[in-house]
């Protein structure tokens, strides 16, 4: 389907909003959810994130060395992520406030 992406760990196909997008920019830096360059997608779940790190699937897809700091940032995001199956704008806090996807790394990347 148009607009669907594939997780590098479990090969699940789904809408782009259900994955983290990890990007290798032309200057070689690695960023999450922003920028134009070679991209890889990983599910927003512990199993896929662990497998991507253990089997070096993100690095292989991006043809780059992935810093442990990047995985630490993804684990941090996982701990505050909305429930599985909900997009970032669908989850709400008590009182009806929307949870936005405001966590982004700068253009300079990690590591």
Image (spheres, rainbow, N blue to C red):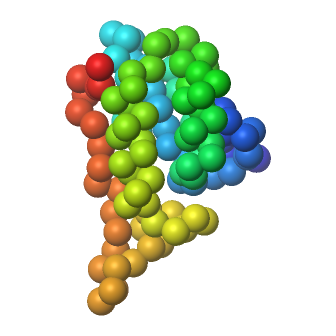
Vertical arrangement, residue 73 with respect to residue 66, above or below: below
Instruction: Please tell me which residue is depicted at 30% across the width and 25% down the height of the picture.
Output: 110
Vertical arrangement, residue 30 with respect to residue 19, above or below: above
| Residue 75 percent across, percent down from the top left | 42, 45
Vertical arrangement, residue 98 with respect to residue 102, above or below: below
| Residue 93 percent across, percent down from the top left | 34, 79
Residue positioned most to the bottom: 95
Task: Examine the rendering and report whether any part of residue 52 can be seen.
Answer: yes
Instruction: Please tell me which residue is depicted at 54% across the width and 19% down the height of the picture.
Output: 59
Q: Viewed as shown, does residue 104 lie left or right of 64?
A: left
Query: Exactly how many numbered labels are in the figure?
Result: 0
Q: Viewed as shown, does residue 87 lie left or right of 7?
A: left
Instruction: Please tell me which residue is depicted at 58% across the width and 64% down the height of the picture.
Output: 84
Instruction: Please tell me which residue is depicted at 42% across the width and 42% down the height of the picture.
Output: 74
| Residue 8 percent across, percent down from the top left | 66, 33
Image quarter of residue 33: top left
Task: Examine the rendering and report whether any part of residue 35 can be seen.
Answer: no
| Residue 53 percent across, percent down from the top left | 55, 29
Q: In which quarter of the image is the C terminus?
A: top left
């Amino acid at each position: 389907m148009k607009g669907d992406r594939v997780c590098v760990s479990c090969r699940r196909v789904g809408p782009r909003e259900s994955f983290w997008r990890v990007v290798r920019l032309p200057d070689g830096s690695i960023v999450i959810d922003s920028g134009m360059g070679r991209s890889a997608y990983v599910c927003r779940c512990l199993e896929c994130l662990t497998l991507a790190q253990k089997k070096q699937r993100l690095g292989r897809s991006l043809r780059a060395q992935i810093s442990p700091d990047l995985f630490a940032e993804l684990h941090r995001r996982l701990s505050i992520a909305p429930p599985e199956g909900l997009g970032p704008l669908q989850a709400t806090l008590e009182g009806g406030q929307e949870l936005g996807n405001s966590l982004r790394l700068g253009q300079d990347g990690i590591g």
